[in-house]
Image (cartoon, rainbow, N blue to C red):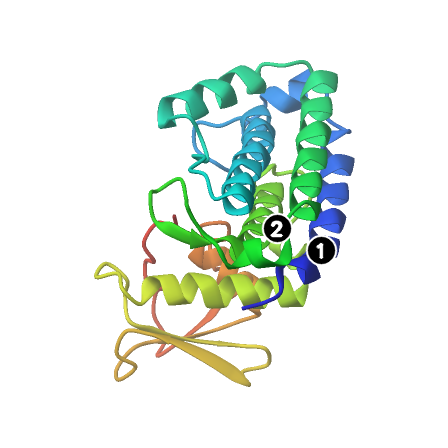
Amino acid sequence: MTDPLLLTGEVDAATDRLFRTAARFDGTDLSAASLLPGWTRGHVLAHLARNADGLVNLLTAARTGEHVPMYASATARETEITAGAARPPEALLDDLRLCADRFTEAVAAMPAEAWAATVQGRSGRPLPAATLVWARLREIEVHHVDLAADYRPADWSEPFAHRLLHEVTAGLADRTDAPAMVLRFDGVRHQLVVGAAEHAPTITGPACELAAWLTGRFDGRTLTVVPDGPLPLPPEWM
């Protein structure tokens, strides 16, 4: 598992890119549709703010040993996102900046031994505290694409795209609704297998496009399939 502190620079850089995009939005921009069904850009930014605070709660739980839920409840989370989405641009951007600072401070406050703790994620599943910095990076990078504001999967760094692709593929291994497939990437030097490889189609493309396709952020039109035919239908991510 990657040392979480090695990812903090990437989180900072991704956060700065997100801020630059969000700073361009006026009220009309924020009310425009995002790539997520039923959510505006304002909803996406409000979600990213509340996600940061939710991860601060989990970091606090890891540091103190107390049970601190990521969110008070699913209803409270949805209510806060809806309310945040309606804020004026300046208020929404300020909220995003403040929660990013709180996340940075919570990471800095973690003693080395606390990273070995296990916390309870939003779904109720146990999460290693050491994965929380990666979780924040993943949220920022994927939802930045969801803003539909000229930030695309091709803008993801190669290490990020590779890690996301490996994570999503590993998550499909235990799903009965995942089609069998072989994924080839990085100049076809590497491949990942979902299900039984025999007779499964081989899908080839850059790691960023494969990861974006599997997470529902890309239609896969530039991916190649052998034998020739339609792309399999991956199940909904998360």
- 69 and 189: which is toward the camera: 69
> Residue 104 location, x and y as percent?
70, 42
> Which mark, residue 111?
none
> Residue 109 location, x and y as percent?
68, 45
Instruction: Identify the residue at horizontal 55%, vertical 65% (top origin).
Output: 163
For the residue carrying disc 2, how many other residues have a C-alpha within 10 Å: few (<14), some (14-19), or many (20+)?
Answer: many
Image height of 82 relative to 146, above or below? above
Image height of 90 relative to 70, above or below? above
Instruction: Identify the residue at horizontal 23%, vertical 58% (top origin).
Output: 177
> Residue 45 location, x and y as percent?
60, 30
Which image quadrant: the N terminus? bottom right
> Residue 17 location, x and y as percent?
75, 44
Q: Which of marks 2 and 1 is nearer the N terminus?
A: 1
Residue receiving disc 1: 10
Q: Quadrant of residue 100?
A: top right
Q: Is 205 placed left or right of 24 in the picture?
A: left
Image height of 34 relative to 124, above or below? above
The residue tagged with tag 2: helix, strand or loop?
A: helix
Instruction: Identify the residue at horizontal 71%, vertical 28% (top origin).
Output: 98
For the residue carrying disc 1, how many other residues have a C-alpha within 10 Å: few (<14), some (14-19), or many (20+)?
Answer: some
Instruction: Identify the residue at horizontal 49%, vertical 28% (top origin).
Output: 39
**Mark 1 residue type:** Glu
- Give the CA distance from mark 2 to mark 1: 7 Å
Please tell me how many numbered marks the rendered image carries: 2
Q: Do the residues labelled 2 and 1 touch (CB within 8 Å)?
A: yes
The residue tagged with tag 1: helix, strand or loop?
A: helix
- 185 and 80: which is toward the camera: 80
Residue receiving disc 2: 137
- 116 and 224: which is toward the camera: 116
**Mark 2 residue type:** Leu
